[in-house]
Amino acid sequence: MSPNVEDSLEREEVVETDYPYYTEWSEKMGNFHPKSLVNLTIDAKSTELFYESVTKQPTTIKGMFYTQSRDDYLGVFVTVKSPISKCLRQNTCAYLFLPLSVKNRANVGNEVLYSHDAPEGFFSLEAKMVGNYEIALTNSHWMTPVYVTFATGTDDHSILKSEHVENTFNRVKKLEEHIDNIYSQFRYFWTHNNRQMIATKKAQGRLLLYAVLQFSIILICSVVSLWYVKRSVSNKRIL
């Protein structure tokens, strides 16, 4: 892990908006208070594992990630798996000799709840089991390391809040949670919009190059045509 990785993205003012994108964030990531926000370097063909502990139900696991790179192809593959069932962990030997139909009914847990391969993304999952949920960040590239910012948390913090006693401590805690939410949302949206801006600039550059090339070809063809006509007229005068 490299906790002090600097952002390689240029800080530019973003003017474009993506309303459906912000709406999806508001629906899935509302009241997102990350327990951890880390910057890490994932080496080529390697995986970093994180675990989110769920002690009671219902609990929602939320998280977001983005790569600190201008290139769209430098993504990261993120998977979230549910914990293995307690009965399977305690009776592994007996489980091996069960019929296939019984195994299918007993094989509860260790399911892939979320998988996404992209430079950025966020998830909101309902935890149906108590245990440690595995979050894997995989760099599938052969040669290039990927710098990733990753944040995750659960909504069980709301259970610890006191709705009846509004003292200074509770207000400070609420303010900290709102700041964490705003910071995570700002960083994620800034990265998303900055990547879109860079892609637009690249497309504009390619379009300008194509226009210059087309103009050059037309100019050359025009010069050649004028030269050919002039030469033909000169030959007729000599005759």
Image (cartoon, rainbow, N blue to C red):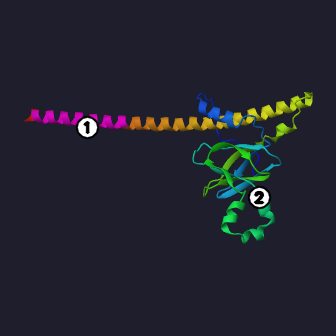
Count of marks, rendered view:
2
CA distance separating discs 1 and 2: 79 Å
Image quarter for residue 232?
Answer: top left
Query: Are discs 1 and 2 less than 8 Å apart at CB?
Result: no
Check disc 2 and report its element: helix, strand or loop. loop
**Measured from the top left, where is residue 15 in percent x and y?**
60, 27
Q: Return the residue nearer the eye: 227 or 206.
A: 206
Q: Which secondary structure, mark 1?
A: helix
The amino acid type found where label 1 is placed reads Val
Residue at point 68% right, 58% down? Answer: 46
Q: Is residue 219 above or below residue 118?
A: above
Mark 2: amino acid: Ser
Quarter in which the C terminus is drawn: top left
Residue 212: x and y in percent read 40, 35
Question: Which residue does the numbered mark 1 point to in the structure image?
Answer: 224
Residue 177 among magenta residues: no
Drawn side of residue 146 relative to residue 38, left or right: left
Check disc 2: other Cα within 10 Å, few if <14, some if 14-19, many if 20+.
Answer: some
Where is residue 115 shown, x and y percent of the image? 64, 50
101 and 135: which is toward the camera: 101
At label 1, counting other C-alpha atoms closer than 10 Å, the crowd grade (few under 14, some 14-19, many 20 or more) is few
Q: Which residue is mark 2?
A: 85
Name the side, left or right, on which 90 lies relative to 77.
Answer: right
Write the start and end of the magenta stretch as one range: 214-236
Q: Is residue 234 magenta?
A: yes
